[in-house]
Image (cartoon, helix red, strand yellow):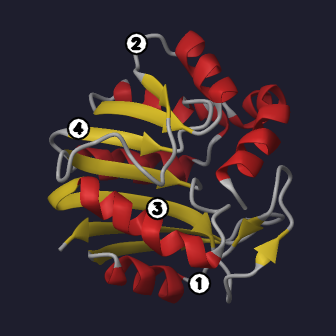
Amino acid sequence: MTDSQVQQAYAARAAEYTAILGAIDDMHELDRSHMERWAEQISGRIIDAGCGPGHWTDFLHRRGADISGIDLVPEFIESARLRFPDVSFQVSTLRGLDAADGSLNGVLAWYSLIHLPPAELPPVLIELARVLSPQGRLLVGFFEGESAEPLDHAVTTAYCWSVDQMSGLLHDAGFEVIEVEKRQDPGNRPHAAICAIVR
């Protein structure tokens, strides 16, 4: 899908999405603890790449992280700025980040890569590697599955990846995988998270 298609799909349901999924208390406890541990290992600037309504950005900000959020959807950014005025949010695409080479210490990509078709994911991962410093940390959350095929999603077409597939793409983009977490909750799709560092 194009950025424009994803933007329009989320813009049409931004208020609904924020009401259902925009509160940190509604997020899985294991995800909260995992993300907090990840951020504690980073000293320096982090971006929440594809921050949506900004709840994860604020969660880490309140725990002392130097973090800002970016998202493709202006409606999400407007809402995030109103709800979390102490955090910086900007409209931006993941395909060309407004950051110098090696200028970031962490990138959070929590379910923000799921709408990228398989052929379009590698260049975005390379872009994330570009902006990270050596040993900079990336945390990716995604739907885990056996093949990178389209799946039904409440907003627009999404894709699942096996841990092996995603790990291989990260390696090709210049990352080293250092931690993998997988979870299957009743009634939900399998979840995976990969922490990787720039080689």
Res 2 → quadrant: bottom right
Query: How far apart, in angstroms, are the residues tagged by discs 4 and 3?
Result: 17 Å
- The residue lying at 72 percent from left, 37 percent from top is 21
Q: Quadrant of the N terminus?
A: bottom right
| Residue 194 visible in the shown view | no
Label 3 packing within 10 angstroms: few (<14), some (14-19), many (20+): many
Left or right of 92 in this view: 186: right
Secondary structure beneath dot 2 equals loop
Q: Which residue is mark 2?
A: 86
Viewer-nearest residue: 65 or 167? 167
Q: Residue at x 81, y 44 (%)?
A: 9
In this rendering, the count of numbered labels is: 4
Vertical side of 132 occupied by 43: above or below: above
The residues bearing labels 2 and 4 have C-alpha atoms spaced at a distance of 16 Å
Residue highlighted by disc 4 = 45
Q: Earlier in the sequence, mark 1 or mark 4?
A: 4
Q: Earlier in the sequence, mark 2 or mark 1?
A: 2
Q: SS at mark 1?
A: loop
Whether tag 3 and tag 1 are in contact, CB under 8 A, the answer is: no
How far across and how far down the image is residue 113, in percent?
Answer: 57, 60
Amino acid type at image mark 3: Val
Identify residue for label 1.
162
Q: Report crowding for label 2: few under 14, some 14 to 19, many 20 or more residues within 10 A (C-alpha).
A: few
Q: Quadrant of the C terminus?
A: bottom left
| Residue 180 percent location from the top left of the image | 42, 74
Asked if the residue under mark 4 is in contact with the one under mark 1, i.e. CB atoms within 8 Å, the reply is no
The kind of residue on which mark 2 rests is Asp
Q: Mark 3 and mark 2: span between their CA atoms?
A: 25 Å
Tag 3 near tag 2, CB within 8 Å: no
